[in-house]
């Protein structure tokens, strides 16, 4: 029997930036993130690629085609491919998706630049799959001032961004994270996706973030698990995950493997969101390999094969942990288990 070789296993590079700087820990350079990713190895298996945030200091979204080619060459030099990209849609260069006309224009322009880069990387041959990730660049508090009107504005902005992405042959995925207005709960996320109503618009699920959907953080009325939930009740947790994934799986076109200890966390300028924990954190509430199956298989237990790579996002890990080779080997081992249980083989 052949060992599964899909989905491909990717590591995110943006955890070297997100939550770093601005009074927090120093940024970890892009080259260092690539080096650590390429060095990880478990029983002869290595990471296949990286997902990349298109923001400084790692990469300038305004780069020329020569700069895009240099990025591709640098990643290829480490034996890695490129998958999904994160569009830098936030102020000051971008703007709120539910903001002023100028805010929304800047948002869409940042998506356009990101889709150009995505297309060029496909043409170069280093990127055969993946999406361009976006969010609302707005807080739940701001959204809550006018839920109906703000959801309508976000959807209008997303539709315009989707139409531009389609011109480049790209799909957009909205990040399911509790710190983004209009996508801070599973129900508001579905409302936003339905209102957007574009065939190239989907959902990015991150196991650390979506666990907080169950808890109703920032949207208590939408919680699935009861207050003061007993985490030892595995059957109830599985029932909650089953309900959550049944609602969001049809939209899911990008997936992050992760662990969470049931708490929120934020560092630097990043708002609190579902805490990313080490893969082997003893306080982790998820059985990573088993619970990934709720996203990777349908309600009948059949593989969806909805995306050709999965990614680990270790945002806001301390630098002391991120610079240890053992951290990345443990993460890679967890991802291999996910692929062994929920992957497939292609010749």
Image: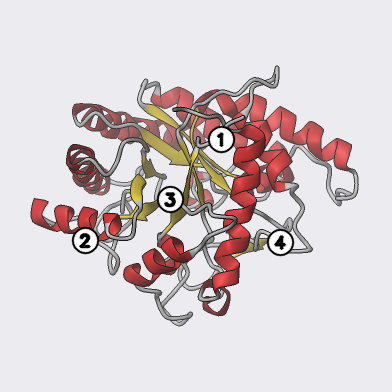
Is 175 situated above or below 141?
above
Q: Quadrant of the C terminus?
A: top left
Contact? badges 1 and 2 (CB < 8 Å): no
Q: Nearer the viewer, residue 34 or 181?
A: 34
Q: Earlier in the sequence, mark 3 or mark 2?
A: 2
Q: Which mark is residue 138?
A: 3
Q: SS at mark 2?
A: loop
**Tag of residue 4:** 1
Q: Nearer the viewer, mark 4 or mark 2?
A: 4
CA separation in Å, label 3 and label 2: 22 Å
Q: CA distance from mark 4 to mark 1?
A: 23 Å
Q: Residue at x 24, y 27 (%)?
A: 166
Q: Nearer the viewer, mark 3 or mark 1?
A: 1
Where disc 1 sits, the SS reads loop
Estimate how packed mark 3 is, as few (under 14), some (14 to 19) or many (20 or more) residues with alpha carbons within 10 Å. Answer: many
Give coordinates of residue 317: x percent, y percent.
56, 69
Q: Nearer the viewer, mark 4 or mark 1?
A: 1
Label 1 packing within 10 angstroms: few (<14), some (14-19), many (20+)? some
Residue furthest to the top in view is 300
Image position, residue 85 (x, y; %): 34, 47
For label 4, the residue is 280
Between marks 4 and 2, how big is the CA–CA gap? 34 Å
Q: Quadrant of residue 301?
A: top right
């Amino acid at each position: 029997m052949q060992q599964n070789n899909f989905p491909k296993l990717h590591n995110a590079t943006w955890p070297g930036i997100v939550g770093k700087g601005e009074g927090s820990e120093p940024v970890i350079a892009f080259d260092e993130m690539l080096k650590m990713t390429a060095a990880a190895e478990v029983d002869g298996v290595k990471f296949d690629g990286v997902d990349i945030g298109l923001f400084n200091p790692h990469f300038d979204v305004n780069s020329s085609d020569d700069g895009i080619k240099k990025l591709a060459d640098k990643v290829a030099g480490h034996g890695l491919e490129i998958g999904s990209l994160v569009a830098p849609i936030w102020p000051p260069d971008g703007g709120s998706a539910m903001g002023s006309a100028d805010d929304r224009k800047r948002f869409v322009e940042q998506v356009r630049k990101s889709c150009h880069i995505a297309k060029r990387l496909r043409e170069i041959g280093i990127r055969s799959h993946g999406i361009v990730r976006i969010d609302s660049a707005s807080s739940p508090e701001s959204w809550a001032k006018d839920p109906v009107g703000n959801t309508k504005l976000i959807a209008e902005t997303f539709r315009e961004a989707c139409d531009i992405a389609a011109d480049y042959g790209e799909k957009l995925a909205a990040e399911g994270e509790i710190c983004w207005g209009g996508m801070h709960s599973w129900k508001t996320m579905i409302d936003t996706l339905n209102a957007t109503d574009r065939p190239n618009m989907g959902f990015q699920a991150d196991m650390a973030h979506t666990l907080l959907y169950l808890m109703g953080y920032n949207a208590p009325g939408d919680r699935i698990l009861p207050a003061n939930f007993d985490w030892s009740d595995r059957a109830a947790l599985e029932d909650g995950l089953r309900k959550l994934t049944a609602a969001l799986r049809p939209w899911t076109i990008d997936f992050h493997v992760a662990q969470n200890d049931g708490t929120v966390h934020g560092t630097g300028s990043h708002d609190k969101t579902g805490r990313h924990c080490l893969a082997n954190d003893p306080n982790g509430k998820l059985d990573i390999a088993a619970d990934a199956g709720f996203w990777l298989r349908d309600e009948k237990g059949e593989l969806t094969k909805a995306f050709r790579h999965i990614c680990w996002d270790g945002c806001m890990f301390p630098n002391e942990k991120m610079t240890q080779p053992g951290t990345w080997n443990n993460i890679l081992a967890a991802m291999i288990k996910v692929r062994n249980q929920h992957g497939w083989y292609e010749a």
